[in-house]
Image: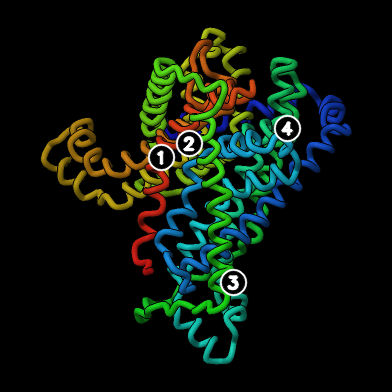
Amino acid sequence: MLLAAAVAALALVPLGHIVVAAAGVGWSGIVELVFRPRVAELLVNTVRLVGGAVVVCVVLGVGAAWLVERSAVPGRRVWHVLLVAPLAVPAFVTSYAWISLLPGFDTYGGALLVVSLSYSPFVYLPAVAAFRGLDPALEDTARGLGLSTWGVFRRVQLPQLRVAVLGGALLVALHVLAEFGALAMLRYPTFTTAVYDQYRATFNGPGATMLAGVLVLLCLVLLLAEIRLRGARGYARTGAGAARTVRPVRLGALAAPALLALAAVVALSVGVPLVSLVRWMTTGTSAGLDVATLATTTGTTLALAAAAAVVTTVCALPTGWLAVRRRGPVATLLERSTYLGSAVPAIVIALALVTVSIRLVPALYQTVPVLLAAYAILFLPRAIVTVRAAVEQSPPLHDDVAASLGASAPARLWRVTLPLLAPGIGAGAALVFLAVVTELTATLLLAPTGTTTLATAFWSASSALEYGAAAPYAVVMVLLSAPATVLLSRDVRRGLTT
């Protein structure tokens, strides 16, 4: 219990920092810093980008999921993998690809296109999973009653996709709200980019903190809105039902336009970044590749990612175990606290840890432990979810038997519990590892002086318009992120037929 409470306290440091800072500034200071024209401009920019991205991602994600799961479009397995592939390309790399090919791309339309292409898989994946869980008998009955294909989708399928689509839309909204690298490169100002600029200008002054507070409030509004829109209505079957084979809808004359639409989405989201990377790797004037520097940077990135995976997974163990073995209000509160902390954008977390380290332990400022703490706050849910699932599947009977045979608590932990939880621990560590490889914002603010990761090296080169020099770092990040894409698409891909 104490360990889980300590983990929850770490996750809530950013929120605590905002509350303390707001109290210190006072209401008059808050009014002066928040209620001004610049903040209103940032609010409009942020809201319209988030709203536009959610709409575009829902249309792309649900439409693509329907084509893959319910239509007879050729090559469904291949399309499925390609539609998940954008997750292997960080959003700031996609932004780099477009802005290096089209220098005048730094507009609202450009920002909307980049974030929509990067984050549409967050809607596509849950929509595919939901389609696979639907009972096709309902659709057959609706068709038997005379509904058209569009009518079946609108009145039968779409209502049952509500929870999945809302969850995916929430992920899109939170990611766009927290996005820094892609939008800074496109010179599109939002609260996240403004917090970074304010921090650099005043070194963590009250202006940056209050902007971070507004950003946190927007995150909370999104979380509450998703809960309200989702409602309490259930969509699960009341029984196992009979196994039914889904009959794909023949597209007829619409087959060619459907294929063109899928090809366009894949080409824009994956093709353009890959073509841009290849171009700058081969023809960029600044592409003098320093293999030693690239190798050193890759090694530093892998070392930080491995350390973060270990630290975050260790932090997730007591929380995941407590949530299953000691169910109750306190356990639930401690577990949910870790999710709330990770919903805060990375720049707010970095800002809070900078303040805490400077004021309480100045020696820790810009050290690896502070950076690892930021990674833990950001990615704790990825580890907790997998650890909790492993604990759920591990019956306490084994531990009880070991105790009855005289094994001590440490011996039971080492010889019984951890081996049973190993698959979940490994999966959580892998997810954290891959996330840290491409993390940019917190690393920019918290990395020790002289420490360079693939993301920060890429950012430094691309910000200086040295696109050729930035390309190798982007290529390595994509290659390291590719396994996560394969893992995400593998299970859902099973059962698809061409």
- Measured Cα–Cα span from mark 1 to mark 3: 31 Å
Residue furthest bottom as drawn: 145
Is disc 4 placed on a helix, strand or loop?
loop
Is disc 2 placed on a helix, strand or loop?
helix
- Measured Cα–Cα span from mark 4 to mark 3: 38 Å
- Mark 2, residue position: 379
Point out residue 149 in the picture as x, y percentages from the top left corner: 57, 80
- Mark 1, residue position: 431
Marked residue nearer the N-terminal end (4 or 3)? 3
The quadrant of the image that shows the N terminus is top left
Position of 119 relative to 463 (above/below) = below
Which disc number belongs to residue 187? 4
Whether pointer 4 and pointer 1 mark residues with C-beta atoms closer than 8 Å, the reply is no
- Mark 3, residue position: 159
Q: Residue at x 45, y 83 (%)?
A: 137
Point out residue 112 in the picture as x, y percentages from the top left corner: 69, 46
